[in-house]
Amino acid sequence: MKLFGSSKDEDTAKVEEKGAGKGRPTPKRKDAEARNRRPLVVDKKEARKRRREQRDEVYKKQREALDGTGDERYLPLNDQGPLRRYIRDFVDARFAIGELFMPIVLAFLILSIAFSRNQQLNSILLFTMWGLLLLALIEAIITTIIINRSLLKITDGDKRVKKGNGRYILMRLASPRRMRRPRPSGPRGSRPDISEYASDIRAYMLSRP
């Protein structure tokens, strides 16, 4: 009789109807949590991949800039700006004694090993190396004075143009020309005319704090 409750068939039909309306059984809590976490892991992997691609792209542009074929904006911070560009062009325009320092040091090491018993030869090589180093330092000092005077003249005595120039010039002079980075922008020749750089250098200095 159906007076006091639903029959078993009716209960079964209600359960089936409820399940059909939902379309699927209720998932367990741990399954739901696992499914919710899974996209986050994928997002992190994608984010790492994008960061790596962006980093590789920046490195590529920096290498191109150092090789002289790319945008100067991607140069290392110490090489950026018209002031540094003028210094590089000034130094690269002529032969420097400092360019011989690294080859001389390498030759000294090889010869000192090959003729380790010849004290007289080793003494000559050692004095030659130190003499060359002294000449390179003197050359760097003179070059720095000349460049700084020119920069002070076009910037009305703004002493900020001198900051770090000595070290930058010395490192540039001490490197063989073909190993210099950024690469020289042209062949050896006459010194660059600073008037061609003056407006860019002034604007650059005004933009600095």
Image: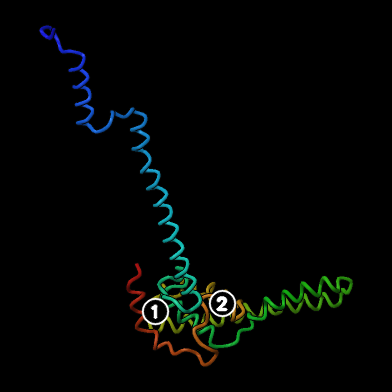
Marked residue nearer the N-terminal end (1 or 2): 1
**x and y, in percent, of residue 75 in the image:** 45, 71
Quadrant for residue 14, please give it: top left
Q: Helix, strand or loop at disc 2? A: loop
Q: Quadrant of residue 198?
A: bottom left
**Image-based side of 181 in relation to 124, left or right:** left
The one of 98 and 103 positioned closer to us in this rendering:
103
What x and y, as percent, mark residue 117? 89, 71
Give the residue drawn at x 86%, y 77%: 120
Work out which quarter of the rendered image holds the C terminus and state it. Answer: bottom left
Q: Which residue is mark 2?
A: 180
Residue 12 location, x and y as percent? 22, 19
The image position of residue 6, as x and y in percent, is 15, 13
Q: Amino acid at mark 1?
A: Gly
The foreground one among 88 and 58 is 58
Left or right: where does residue 148 sit relative to residue 131?
Answer: left
Q: Residue at x 59, y 77 (%)?
A: 179
Mark 1 or 2, closer to the camera: 2
Quadrant occupied by the N terminus = top left
What label sits on residue 157 in the rendered view? 1
Circle 2 Cα neighbour tier, 10 Å, few/some/many (<14 / 14–19 / ≥20): some
* Crowd around label 1: few <14 · some 14–19 · many ≥20 (10 Å): some
**Quarter holding residue 155:** bottom left
**Residue drawn at (50%, 90%), measured in percent from left and top?**
191
In the displayed image of the protein, which residue is found farthest to the left?
A: 3
Q: Would residue 153 appear left or right of 5 to someone viewing this image?
A: right
Q: Amino acid at mark 2?
A: Arg
**View extreme (bottom): residue:** 190
Q: CA distance from mark 1 to mark 2?
A: 30 Å
